Amino acid sequence: MAQNDPILKIKNLSVAYGQVKALTDISIEVLKGEIVVLVGANGAGKTSIMETVLGANVPVSGTIEFKGKSIGGVPVDKNVRNGMYLVPEGRGVFSSMTVMDNLLLGAHHNLKNADSKLELVFDSFPVLGNRKSQVAGTLSGGERQMLAIGRALMSSPEMILVDEPSIGLAPIIVNDIFEILVNLNKEGYSILLSEQNVYKALKIAHRGYILETGKMTKHGTADELLNDPAVREAYLGA
């Protein structure tokens, strides 16, 4: 796959929960090697996009392609095996399990290479290596977020979906998490990020999409959106 090819292509996607429309006619592309951010208020549909891409929701209409192949109706575990992993909102770690056990769960479909992947995770997150025997529920919020991202790396993903990583974290920890995402992107991971912290998200992204009540209202490069008067007024208080 060439660098300018979409690793993820969503076209005219609509999703409903019963009679409630969650997403209407959403089209998004993530090119290989990009950070693309979905921004919008709580309830805008960001998580619905993430979950539908992963395979947890069945679209009403539209198409989703990953690495050039349709993944509509493909189950979550197959998408994970094929190189996609979701870091869910709220960290999503297993609180009663150790750091090590949480990480090994990320590699459950390919334990043969677990040792080399653990080395990668502990290089990226030294604090996890120091606390690998510690119960995950005793970690700080920032450390749990690092653990959730580390568990994603254990699955050898080509694209990481990261849903609202800044929620509940102190600003200094948010800076650390965003720096980690930038470093992972430099190492070759494509990242689809959803985030309410519009300024910080656009500062690290290549491109962005603005969502309001399940509909796409704007898209463009990160710089274009940061300098758009309507975006600045709605989301940046300027």
Image: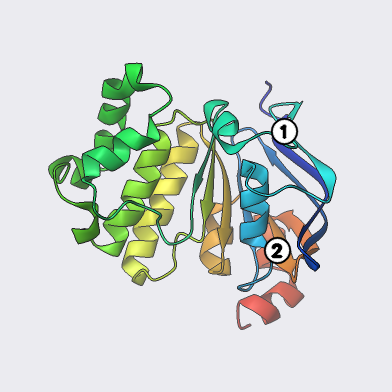
Q: Please give left or right for residue 73 compared with residue 14 in the image.
A: left
| Residue 32, quarter of the rendered image | top right
In terms of sequence position, does the residue under pointer 2 or pointer 1 come before the other?
1
Check disc 1 and give the amino acid type.
Answer: Ile
Let me know if residue 207 appears in the view: no
Q: Residues within 10 Å of mark 2 (few under 14, many from 20)?
A: many
Residue at label 2? 225
Residue at label 1? 71
Say which residue appears at 51% left-offset and 35% top-offset: 189
- The picture places residue 74, in percent across and down from the top left corner, at 68, 33
- Which of discs 2 and 1 lies nearer the camera? The answer is 1
Residue 212 drawn above or below residue 105: below
- The picture places residue 185, in percent across and down from the top left corner, at 49, 39
Residue 163 drawn above or below residue 108: below
Quadrant where the C terminus sits is bottom right
Q: Marks 2/1: CA distance? A: 30 Å
